[in-house]
Structure formats: C-alpha cells, structure tokens
Amino acid sequence: MSEFKIFTTYLLNFIAISAVLAVDPDTLQDLCVADASSGVKLNGFACKESANVTAEDFFFAGLANPGKVNNSVGSLVTGANVEKIPGLNTLGVSLARIDYEAGGLNPPHTHPRATEVIFVLEGELDVGFITTANKLISKTVKKGEIFVFPKALVHFQKNNGDKVASVISAFNSQLPGTQSIAATLFAATPAVPNNVLTKAFQVGTKEVEKIKSRLAPKKT
C-alpha cells in the first residue's frame, strides 16, 4: 500500500473517530456523581466516592419559579447543569430555564457543545438561528410549542409581547457552554484589540469604546 493510501486511511479513520466522540462521552458505569472538590483535572469531573452519593446529588429545585430579571437585556438564564446537579456528570444532558420581561431579549449566542431544544412555558417569543451560509431561520413560538437550535449555531430569543415569557431549555450535554457574541467580542479579558473590531465591524474607535464601556462587567 502506498504512503498516500496509508495516510488517507488513517485520516478517514481519524475523522470517523472524531465524529463519534464529538458529543459528551457515554458513561461506563451506573453513575459518576461530580466531585467538585477533587483536584483531578479531566474532561468532565472526577467521580465522588459511591458511599458518599445521596439523592441530593440528583435533585435541583431552581427551575420551579421564575427568576428575577435585573439586567439591561431583560432576560435571565437559570442553568440546571452538572455544576448545579452533580449527578448529571457523564450523563450528557442538562436543562435551563429562561425568563423574559416584556420586550426582553436573550442576545445572540452559541452553545459550543450542545444542541438546544426550548419548550415555551408562558408567553410568545420570536426565535431564530443563523446557519453557516448566513441564512436566518426564524419563527414565532407560543405557549406549549417547541423550537430547536442546532449545535454551535448563533441563535436568539426575543419577547416582543407586553407580558412576561418563559421557556425550559434542554441540551444534549451536561455542560453546554454559552458564548454571547457581543460579550465575547467586546468584553473579553484581555480585550480584543480595537483595530480588530473596527476593521471587522467597519466602525470607528469611538463606537467600539462606547460598546465596550456598556458591556464591561460592573464593578462591585
């Protein structure tokens, strides 16, 4: 077999293996409750000793009631992931609740490790995602309806009504991660250089500085 064929075979095998592993790995035991106090660093969390596992490791009441929205965008995300429910470790699923004030927005963002499915609890939302071909897929969803945001694509939800709204979100990852587009670009630490942002957005330095000042973390 020629070196080129050998290289091609290895490359195709690598791509196939990468595709299989491109989600949270399957568990190899009944449970692996996350031990947040462990100093062991790995892809996920080390397992708590089974003798120390309790029902509380699998319980969370934080989504039962609406969260208190107190920010400029008018929405609040309450996560129910492995950081809140240690028993989710290695199980590849998590939830969140999102509450919106009238006119509230969950700004454009991505989840690099998960697809998201929302179920509307109350209200009405305009939702959408943008494909890599720059096509906007959008729809208005109402109470009892579902919408899906494909993994890693930029998406948003906007409450254009005059009443509050809320959804439950489901993810196929124990820790899907969130990158808000505006905050990622304009509030990173260290800061993204102004000349990168002015060139990318075709605006002046003053406009960039103004946006950065508005998105900067508030000092306590």
Image: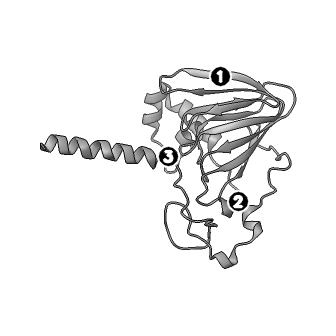
Image quadrant in which the N terminus is located? top left
* Cα separation between marks 2 and 3: 30 Å
Q: Mark 1 or mark 2, which has the lower sequence index? A: 2
The residue at 50%/28% (across/down) is 204
Secondary element at image label 1: strand
Residue type at mark 2 is: Lys
The residue at 47%/42% (across/down) is 192
Counting every numbered tag in the picture gives 3
100 or 73, which is in the foreground? 100
Residue 191 badge:
3
159 or 54, which is in the foreground? 54
The residue at 65%/22% (across/down) is 138
Residue type at mark 1 is: Ser
- Other residues around mark 3 within 10 Å, as few (<14) / some (14–19) / many (≥20): few
Image quadrant in which the C terminus is located? bottom right
Residue behind mark 2 = 84
